[in-house]
């Protein structure tokens, strides 16, 4: 294989990688209230789980679940596409921190709920989730900007 053929093949591979990452890094900015909305939703969800039982709990958590379905549908329409395939390697760290952070927040909120009470647990979870979603959005945007600006 000649040098020209290798260079053409390498350029084609770079373009393919850029195309695969496009659905992950091309999107409109999240609204300023996005982290606050997730924090408020979490606050209400923790309250519903901690203060209610039986039918009342189901009656409170079902609309909250519907809100999340609506958020996903709205986000898909707003973005115009939905990421497919594996995320780019550079996005895996922020995603891992997000999921680990959510598990940690759930554990700490449960512990606070068991030892102190539901209201403090809900407040802690709401504030922590809002902060984590804000951090994740900023980290994701940084990585996406870097990936979009890479030369072809």
Image (tube, helix red, strand yellow):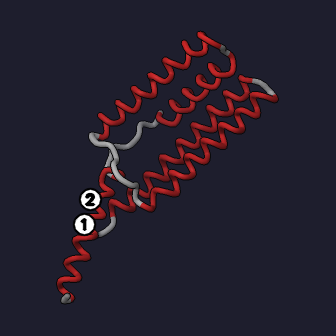
Q: CA distance from mark 1 to mark 2?
A: 6 Å
Can you tell which quarter of the image residue 146 is in? Answer: bottom left
Instruction: Name the residue located 22 percent from the left edge and 81 percent from the top edge.
Output: 7
Q: Please name whichever residue, 75 or 96, is drawn nearer the observer in this view of the structure.
A: 96
Q: What residue lies at 68% left-to-right and 21% top-to-bottom?
A: 50
Q: Is residue 132 left or right of residue 33?
A: right
Q: Residue furthest top?
A: 55
Quadrant the C terminus occupies: bottom left
Q: What residue lies at 49% left-to-right and 24% top-to-bottom? A: 65
Secondary structure of residue under mark 1:
helix
Residue 19 is marked as 2
**Residue 10, position in %: x, y?**
26, 76
**Residue at image mark 1:** 15
Residue 58 is situated, as x and y percent measured from the top left of the image, at: 56, 15
**109 sits left or right of 138 in the view:** right
Q: Residue at x 59, y 24 (%)?
A: 45
Q: Position of residue 73 (x, y in %)?
A: 35, 30
Q: Are marks 1 and 2 in contact (CB under 8 Å)?
A: yes
Crowdedness near tag 2: few (<14), some (14–19) or many (≥20) residues, C-alpha within 10 Å: few
């Amino acid at each position: 294989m000649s040098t020209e053929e290798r260079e053409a093949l390498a350029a084609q591979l770079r373009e393919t990688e850029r195309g695969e990452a496009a659905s992950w890094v091309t999107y409109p900015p999240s609204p300023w209230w996005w982290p606050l909305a997730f924090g408020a939703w979490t606050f209400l969800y923790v309250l519903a789980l901690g203060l209610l039982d039986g039918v009342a709990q189901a009656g409170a958590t079902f609309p909250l679940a519907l809100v999340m379905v609506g958020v996903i549908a709205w986000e898909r329409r707003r973005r115009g596409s939905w990421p497919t395939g594996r995320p780019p390697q550079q996005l895996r760290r922020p995603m891992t921190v997000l999921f680990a952070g959510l598990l940690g927040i759930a554990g700490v909120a449960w512990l606070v709920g068991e030892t102190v009470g539901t209201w403090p647990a809900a407040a802690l979870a709401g504030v922590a989730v809002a902060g984590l979603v804000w951090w994740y959005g900023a980290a994701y945007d940084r990585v996406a900007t870097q990936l979009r600006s890479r030369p072809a």
